[in-house]
Amino acid sequence: MIQRINLLPKELRTVNKRTFYFIASLSIILYLSTLYAFNYSQKANIGALEAKRDSLRQSVSLLARQDAKYREVIDKINLTEAKKKEMEARAGLVSWISDGNTQWSGPLYELSNIVHAGLWFSSLSSSDIMAGDKKFKGIRVSGMALSSSRITDFMAAVEASPFFEGVSLAYVQNTEYNGKEAFSFEITFRIGGKR
């Protein structure tokens, strides 16, 4: 059998192992409890961060849906603005085309209703007339009438019409038509004003 020999001096030979085991156990317990507390704290932090992450994901999802709706609205607004610009361009073109151009259908129809039997035109011409800063269409009609009263009635009807204004008699002359007394005349007036 082997016998062990301790060569240490006697004061160093005796070691109280209980104290060592107690301190070692206490250190291990303290170390494990610190690790447990740290682990518990980290789990709590991770749980809070996961809850915050889930909340942020829901917010991002909600914002993405709202963004999609806003993009639809913006697209509609842009489309509406494009259509508006296109319509303004067309309206500008129509305005440019019709600017200063007289719509002849109404005045000519009115003139045909004013001319009665016994009075007829031999010529009708138009010209631009400036009155102040406005431009008007001037009308000059020449013709014949079987009586001077028909010329007077025609001038009164032109003056009363909402399409015409500024009626003026240029001349009236006695003449003969098919062996009867007749009158040739020239009258000027403007389109516009009273409508």
Image: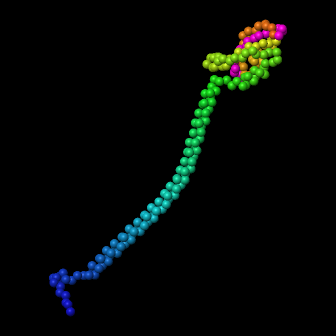
Q: Residue 46 location in percent, x, y?
A: 43, 64
Q: Residue at x 72, y 17 (%)?
A: 124
Q: Is residue 194 magenta?
A: yes
Q: Residue furthest right?
A: 180
20 relative position to 181: left or right: left
Q: Residue furthest bottom?
A: 1
Q: Is residue 148 magenta?
A: no
The coloring applied to the image is rainbow
From the viewer's side, name the closer residue of 180 and 88: 180
Task: Answer whether residue 181 is visible to the viewer in this image.
Answer: yes
**Image quadrant of residue 192?**
top right
- Could you tell me what secondary structure mostly forms the magenta stretch? strand
Q: Residue 136 location in percent, x, y?
A: 66, 19
**Image quadrant of residue 21?**
bottom left
**Image quadrant of residue 172?**
top right
Quarter the C terminus occupies: top right
From the viewer's side, name the closer residue of 112 and 58: 112
The magenta span reads 178-195
Q: Residue at x 63, y 19 (%)?
A: 134
Q: Is residue 121 above or below residue 50?
A: above
Q: Residue at x 80, y 8 (%)?
A: 176
156 relative position to 47: left or right: right
Quarter the N terminus occupies: bottom left
